[in-house]
Amino acid sequence: MRIGSLVYDERSGRMDIRFGLEEYYGGLHCGTGMEVMLDGKWVPTRIEMNINSKWYLVGIDEDSLLGLTVRI
């Protein structure tokens, strides 16, 4: 598994994972599974988009996904 941070790619309109200065996952799609670090623990989740075209993580109550530490 690789650890990175969630970022938004304006060109594709998708969330992505940044692993380093120039290294990215390549764009996330609805249903992509991952784990997110919350309160020092890895929590399994998947990314989805709601009816308002807003990205969210299933079961994760966060206002913003940007910068969250994830592993995939």
Image (cartoon, rainbow, N blue to C red):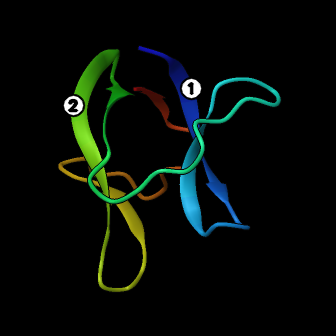
Residue at point 32%, 46% (across, down): 32
Expressed as whole percent of the image width and height from the top left, the position of residue 40 reads 35, 15
**Which disc, if any, is residue 29?**
none
Residue at point 33%, 59% (across, down): 30
Residue sitting farthest toward the right: 21
Expressed as whole percent of the image width and height from the top left, the position of residue 12 reads 64, 66
- In the image, residue 37 sits, relative to residue 50, either above or below, namely above
Question: Mark 2 or mark 1, which is nearer the start of the sequence?
Answer: 1
- In the image, residue 13 sits, relative to residue 5, either above or below, namely below
The residue type indicated by label 1 comes to: Gly
Q: Could you classify mark 2 by the number of other residues whose Cα lies within 10 Å: few (under 14), some (14-19), or many (20 or more)?
A: some
The quarter of the image holding the C terminus is: top left
Please tell me whether mark 2 sits on a helix, a strand or a loop. strand
Q: Could you classify mark 1 by the number of other residues whose Cα lies within 10 Å: few (under 14), some (14-19), or many (20 or more)?
A: many
Cα distance, mark 1 to mark 2? 15 Å
Please tell me whether mark 1 sits on a helix, a strand or a loop. strand
Residue at point 17%, 49% (across, down): 59
Expressed as whole percent of the image width and height from the top left, the position of residue 67 reads 59, 40
The residue type indicated by label 2 comes to: Pro
58 lies left or right of 65: left
Give yes or no for contact between labels 1 and 2 (Cβ–Cβ under 8 Å).
no
**Which disc, if any, is residue 4?**
1
Residue beneath disc 2:
44
Residue sitting farthest toward the front: 26
7 lies left or right of 68: right
- In the image, residue 50 sits, relative to residue 45, either above or below, namely below
The quarter of the image holding the N terminus is: top left
Residue sitting farthest toward the left: 59
Front residue of this view, candidates 16 and 36:
16
Q: Quadrant of residue 25?
A: top right
Residue at point 50%, 37% (across, down): 68
